[in-house]
Every structure is written in C-alpha cells, then in structure tokens.
Amino acid sequence: CLLSSRIASSFSIVSPLVSSSVNKPPRTALLYQRENGRDRDIVVTKPSSDSADPMMPFEDDIPSRTESNGDDQRYDVVTGEVIGAAGRMGSFWLQTSPNVVPVPRGLAPGSLSQKTGVPIYVNIHSGSWKDVYQQTSPERRNDLVWIGNGLLADDSTFEQQDSTVVIPHYAMLQVYGKLYTSEKSPPTYVYGKHAKLVQKELEQHGGVQTEIVTSWTEMKVKAARKIFWASCMWLFCHYDKQSEPLTVKEVHEQYTPQLEKLVQELAPAFHELTSSVTPDADNSAFVKDTLQYLEDYSLSIPDAVVKLECAIDEIPTRNGVFSSQRNKHPQPFHEELIAKVAGSKTLERSIATANTSHDDSTVMSGGRYTIELPLESNNKMSVVCSASTGNNNNVNDDNKKVVVIGDGIVGTSIALNLARRGIKNVVVLDDHATNNGETARASSSRAWINANNKSSASYQWFNQVGMQFWKQDPILRDLPNWDGSLVGYQSKLPPHLSPNAGYPVEGPLSPHRISELQTITKFEDPNHVYHFPSEGHVDHSVAIQSLREEAKRMGVQFISNEEIEDITYHDDHQQEISGVCTKSTITKEITHISADVVVVTTSSGLQKKNHVHRIPILKQSPLVSTTSPSPATVSHVVVVDNVSKSNYVLVGQDDTLEAGGDEYDSFSTSTTAAVHNHRKYQSEPSSLLKDAEDLLISTEGDELPTVGFMSPSAAGGALYVAAANSNSVTLGPFIGALVACEIAENATCELLKSFRPQTKM
C-alpha cells in the first residue's frame, strides 16, 4: 500500500511591534510553518519483520496524546530505551511514555539514559542478542530487558547478569498499533530486575495478562515451551506451498495429528534443554499439556500467520535450539518438515546449531566494538564501530595531521573532538575573517535544535541523539533554550512523528491551548497544530565561539582569510593526500599546509582544480538580514517557513529580528515590515562558488548529511567530507564527535552508514 502525504500548512505572523496583553512570555520558542513544502512519500506496508527500518503505521491507527499544561512533565529525563523500536513489538514501548526513547542502530544501549536503573527494552530477534549484550557497558547490562524467544540460546549470560526476561504471549500486527491478546492466551511471563515495571506497563498500556516468575529454572521451562510454538507453527502454516498460508487457528483444525507427532518427537530435547524430568515414560501427559498450550496461544491470535521469512531468518534460535540435541535425540520428522517447507539449506542451518557453542559471549559479530565519545565521566555515550581500512591507517594517531576546511559549527566541533582524542596537529581553515570566534558573514547554521519532520523514523532518531548530545557536552549543554516549538501542519502528523512514537508531542492543539503557548502568531489552519516541548534553540554564534575557545585551549590552530587553491597528493594517482594549497584573501600569498587527512565541511572558498574530487555538499549559503532592536514585548520566537527553501525568522536575545534563507527576498515580502525595512546586512553567496559548480554536487532538497571518506579505501587518499546540510545546528556537535572518532581511531561508525558520500555520487 502506497500513500503520498503532502505535509504543509500556513499561518500569518502578527506584527511583533504590536504590544501584547500577556505579561508572561510564552513558553514556546519556535513556530514552524509548512507552506507548500516538499512532498513526503511515505511507504505504508504490513511489517515484514521486527527488525525492519523504517516501518510506518497506517495513519488511522495513530493515537493522539492528551493536551497538558506541560508543567508536570520533564522531557529531559529518559525513563527507558528501546532497541528495535522500528519493529512492531518495539514500537509498543515507545507508546508507554514520551520519555521512553528509541536507540538508533549504531548507538550503544544505555547511551541516552546514562544512569543505572533505567530499563533498556530489547525487541530484536534473539540471534542478535549477543551483540546487544556486548555493546552495552557492563554496569548497564542488568538493565537490559530481553523480550522474545531466545532465552535458551545462552541462558547462563542472562542468569549471571540478573537480566530481565519477558516471554511474550501477545501479538502486534503493525507498528504503533495495539497489542492483541485474549483471556484464553497464556500469561506473558516476566523474570528479573525490572519484572514489576514490565508487568505494570504491559497490563496498563496493553491489557496483557502477566505472571512474574521468580525461579530461573521455571523460566527456562516457560521459554522452551514458547519456542515449541515458534518452532512448530510456521512449519504447518506454510506446509502446502500450492495454497495460501494457513492461520494458526487453521493449523490446529487441519494438522493436529502431525503437530502431535512433532511435539512427541521433540519432547526429549525439551527435557534435555530445561533439565526437567518427564513424569511419564511415553511423554503422553507432557504432549497433551503442550498441545493444549499451543492451541490456547494460537486461539488468542487466531488470524495470525507466522511469517516464513522471519522463521527462516531466526531458525538458529527457534528450531535450531531443538536441533542442538539431535545427536542424542534424533528428530527425523522435524528435519523432514524443515526441508519440505524451507529447503535443504535452511535445514543445514538448523542442524549446524548442534555443533555451535553458545558459551562465547565476549565477541561481537563482524569484528565490531564500541568506542566511547569524549564527554564527562557521568555522561557516557558510546557508538558501535568496526575497523577502517585504508585512508592512511599507517599514520600514528598522535602524529596524524588533519586540516579542516570550514570553521562553522561542524568544522569547529570536528577540530575540538580530534583534540579531545589526542590528535595534536589540527588546523582549521576558512576564507573569511573572524572576530573572537564570530564570523564576519552570517553563518549558514540554523538556530533550531529539533528532530521535527524528518524523512524517516531512523533519521528522526539520529537527530534526537544529536539533541541529546547538546545536553551532554560540557561546553554546549548550558547554551540552548529548551522551550519547545509549535508546528502547523495541513493534515495529520507523519506516522513516525506521531504523539506515541518516542518523541514528545502534544496535539492537535485547541485554539485555547495555542494561545496559552504563544501570542504573536495566528495560524490560518489551526486544526493541525502541534507542540513539541523537548525542542529548543541556540545562538549558534555563541555556540561556535565556545567550541572554538575550547579547541584553541587544546592546541587547535585556526587560520582565517584563506581560500583553498588545491588539495595535493604525493603522486598523480591520488593514492595519498599530502595537504592543501591555500591563497590568502588579503596578501594573495600561496601556502602549502601538509596533512594526512583533509576534512571538507563547507563549499565556501573551494576552487575548481583537477585534483579536487566532486564533493556532495550544498552550493549556497543562506541570505541573512536583521532589524534594529524591537520593543521588549516581542517574545523570543523563531518562525520557519517554506521548508524546501529553508527560510526563517527569529528574535534574538537582544530583541533584534532576523530573517534568512535561500530565497530571502521572496520570503521577506510576506513577513513584517520591520524585517523588510531594517536590513542590517545581507551577504550574497560567495562568488567563489560560481567557479566551483563543476566541482560540487548540489544536494538541494536533500536534508540528509554527507559524512565520510570520499573513497572507502586507500585509493583517493584521505579526503573526508562532513556536511550536516539543513540540520547543522542540531547535528553539528554530534557529527563532529563521530567524524573525530573515525579519523582518530581509524574506525567506521555504524551510525553514519546511511550518510556516506558514495550514496550521493
């Protein structure tokens, strides 16, 4: 099912020169307009697996969150993390509280909640549980809540760590949907540290019957019985390949004798796995009880069909658990069914489990490992990485020379984080003059810190981590104002931004609530206005200056008034970078600066030369103008409109009104006369960019960052591009830390996989 959703709205700005009758300044700092914005094509499908990303629900199933005065809710305190939030089962936990947040793939569990005692819900297939365990710092492992059927794969790990384990007996048919269960369903079993909290959430928010299990041995028996259902039902749902797959209810109606035969055959393996003793020689009582359990659970979700692809993918932790006992307890019927339904190769994967040891929980798959970002000791944030190849890995880390082109928030953040990681030779170049860290021309960075209206759930989550990084970096955390924002839409919110999707949202708001939050704007369509209380804004020039001062204190060198004439290599084949040639904008003197890595964060000042690669980065810098100070009655409100052109209006701390964007003139005519008539300055895009049109690839309309080496291997030297594009303020500091991690540690960060330059070439 494909739906095209055009997200747009409009509102008018009431002149800020008109006195407000409200003495108390509004809580809201941002107003966001969607006027003829870019199209968002949302693919709406039935979920194919719990690990798919992103996955969207149907709009009619998105619940609304009740309005609140906002005073009784702290959005800066994370009360839970969700691994696998893009899947059906994971999305449930996001709906329990706006303070339960998704963990994007590549971020180590526990990085967002930071302190022990906060649950980390793991909702991915059990074959990846070992990786999650290794990605989590030792002091947070007992906060992991394992939800699924993989307990028996490595039960010693869970028992030793006092982990919380959930054996679910409920279903969720789509992301952000409802839990399905019934009175006939067996209870969902919960064991471990967070058992009471999990029980409360499932009963209150899902209506699920639960039972807390206090014995580890008993929990192993419950888990093995659930694996019986997961291992048997799919084989009969898809037994007849010539017909439509059967529902689980139809399996019991048509294949009861075969199901009984399979249970009878696997019973000895069950007892071996659980160390349980069968009370009768022929297992008749056990088989009867197990068949009744299978039927009870199936009838609680009678129309469900077990997905064939999912079952095959997870066979090592489903059927493979029983296959691990095949040498001692032969299973010919079991193996015949697997071969018939899924093929001989799948059977081989299941049988291979018999020869696989589950004792080694110390190694993460794919050679991956975690690297902690350089924050304060009580603010631990780690990312999942793998070893990099090429790109001057032979250079000793401490002696590596790095040149960063561009001293905006991204470039300055990269330089600071390189210094934090011990890189002693870092030079930042820019083609304009600076005055105590403030640029002479307007920065292209925006002042809005948000994760609003991103193109996918995964990208929204990446921006949420960027917001969190602002709160954890000791240089930046006290600078933003986190007063929230108002956003007007033409219709409902996109699914991954819905009120119950892991991002605090209030709305749609009533006219009264809108007037409570702000007083200087009037929405033309007030029916779809939402409040995002966790968002904020910052004076980006102050942020850049703070980063710059800290970087200089740590030895970073900043050189202004330098155009980049060329990027140089040791040979004509461009196998290894030797540095950059610069030209002073004042003296016209040519200088060569040696470097092992060159990082490009801006298009400004780049000249067209043969040795410079085609770099996917935005061509233009926005136009900016400001007014003289306005009356004190003006509230500090940011207005952003015309999404595709990135225009905005904001009120600064000194009560000046600033307007900017890619098409300032067309925007200014629709704003207040104060903005239009009081231009303090207006900076045109650098003429240098006109010479670089063949060099640069325009990413107009592409909000995604571009981050990574221009060549993934040693070929092409060590030219690195790091452009946050339309989200530079929100993402700049976080991307800076990730880029420094890749360069200084010779690592590849999994979080940046979707943003590589090769995806835009």
Image (cartoon, rainbow, N blue to C red):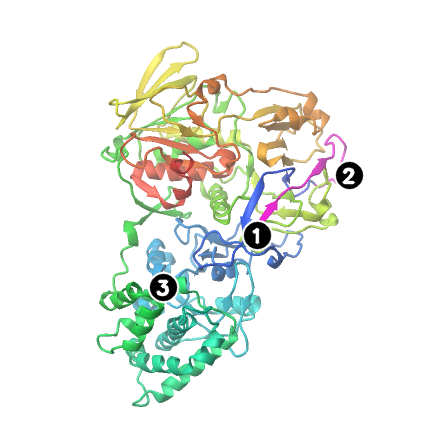
Distance between the Cα atoms at labels 1 and 2?
Answer: 37 Å
Residue under label 1, please give it.
495
Residue under label 2, please give it.
21
Q: Secondary structure at mark 2?
A: loop
Query: Which of the 4 quarters of the picture holds residue 739?
Result: top left
Dominant SS of magenta comes to loop
Q: Position of residue 503 (x, y in %)?
A: 55, 51
Q: Position of residue 590 (x, y in %)?
A: 35, 12
* Nearest to the observer: residue 464 or residue 493: 493
Q: Position of residue 170 (x, y in %)?
A: 49, 70
Q: Indicate whether residue 450 is drawn in magenta.
A: no
Residue under label 3, please give it.
312
Circle 2 crowding by C-alpha within 10 Å: few under 14, some 14–19, many from 20: few
Of labels 1 and 2, earlier in sequence is 2
Q: Which residues are magenta?
A: 1-24
Quadrant in which the C terminus is drawn: top left
Which amino acid type corresponds to the residue marked 3 in the rendered image? Ile
- Can residue 306 be seen here? The reply is yes
- In the rendered structure, the answer to whether residue 388 lies left or right of residue 195 reads left
Which amino acid type corresponds to the residue marked 1 in the rendered image? Pro
Q: Secondary structure at mark 1?
A: helix
Q: Secondary structure at mark 3?
A: helix
* Nearest to the observer: residue 496 or residue 738: 496
Q: Indicate whether residue 2 is drawn in magenta.
A: yes
Q: Position of residue 34 (x, y in %)?
A: 64, 39
Establish if 528 lies above or below 218: above
Query: Which of the 4 quarters of the picture holds residue 84?
Result: bottom left
